Image: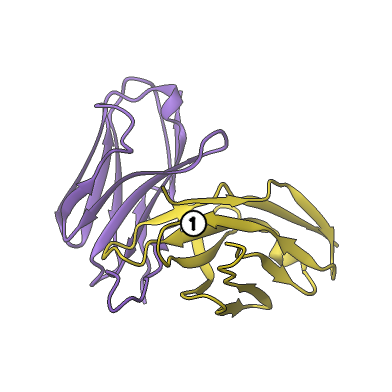
Amino acid sequence: GNSVTQMEGPVTLSEEAFLTINCTYTATGYPSLFWYVQYPGEGLQLLLKATKADDKGSNKGFEATYRKETTSFHLEKGSVQVSDSAVYFCALSDSYSSASKIIFGSGTRLSIRP
Amino acid sequence: DAGVIQSPRHEVTEMGQEVTLRCKPISGHDYLFWYRQTMMRGLELLIYFNNNVPIDDSGMPEDRFSAKMPNASFSTLKIQPSEPRDSAVYFCASSLANRGGSNQPQHFGDGTRLSIL
């Protein structure tokens, strides 16, 4: 079945450091891939998405590229800020289904030190 | 635009009591999802609806849990009787249907933090 595996946290970085959160997936067909972010006390919010191989999703300085050959969708940001502290979820959606059922990874907690 | 609205935001009750969580999805969305989030088990899909009809309830943990969607703008998740192990944050999410190969994201409410004493 479809699944998502992401690096375990917590990840702690200093402000302005480079961020990578690894995500790999297993899926049949051509899923769409997402990164969601959850700030403290809030629900998950869509951060970025990519719908086909080699697509790059980007938002708020974050980027992720859909790599079919390595089945990966790693999240990157060149210079993190304290306000980026949150839990990040990698996720996929089956492109063949009319339902927007999404399979989420386990989440990676990110803490940024001033 | 109003997002997904959940109520209450916090609920504290004693075990054995009935708990009802409420959700108002985004207007026009076709799908509604109920999730449970805990530190131990992460984010779990409990049940989802399409056009008010339950499609998959395989994630509902026990018969003590039930969910309804009487109309397109309202859904409830009920636990009766509640137990301490039901303590978690419960999220509701809604989305449009996937169309033309475009996968739609889910939009989440801010959740209900449930504590069963």
Left or right for A65, reference B85: right
Q: Which residue is mark 1?
A: A43
Residue A73 position (above or below residue B113): below
SS at circle 1? loop
Residue B107 lies in what quarter of the image? bottom left
Residue B57: x and y, percent? 25, 41
Residue farthest to the top, as pictured: B16
The chain that hosts pointer 1 is: A
Residue A78: x and y, percent? 78, 74
Q: Which chain is yellow?
A: A
Number of dots carrying numbers = 1
- The residue that appears at 71% across and 66% down in the rendered structure is A83
Left or right for B69, reference B85: left
The image quadrant where one finds the N terminus of chain B is bottom left
- The residue that appears at 30% across and 71% down in the rendered structure is B98
Q: Nearer the viewer, residue A110 or B20?
A: A110
Residue B17: x and y, percent? 30, 24
Q: Nearer the viewer, residue B49 or B79?
A: B49
Q: Colour of chain B?
A: purple
Residue A39 lies in what quarter of the image? bottom right
- The residue that appears at 80% across and 73% down in the rendered structure is A79
- The residue that appears at 77% across and 65% down in the rendered structure is A19
Residue B43: x and y, percent? 48, 45
Residue A18 lies in what quarter of the image? bottom right
Task: Count residues near mark 1 (Cα–Cα under 10 Å), then give few for <14, some for 14-19, many for 20+.
Answer: many
Q: How is the image coloured?
A: by chain
Instruction: Say what amino acid the circle numbered 1 marks.
Output: Gly
Residue B116 position (above or below residue A88): above
Left or right for A93, reference A12: left
Q: Nearer the viewer, residue A39 or A65?
A: A65
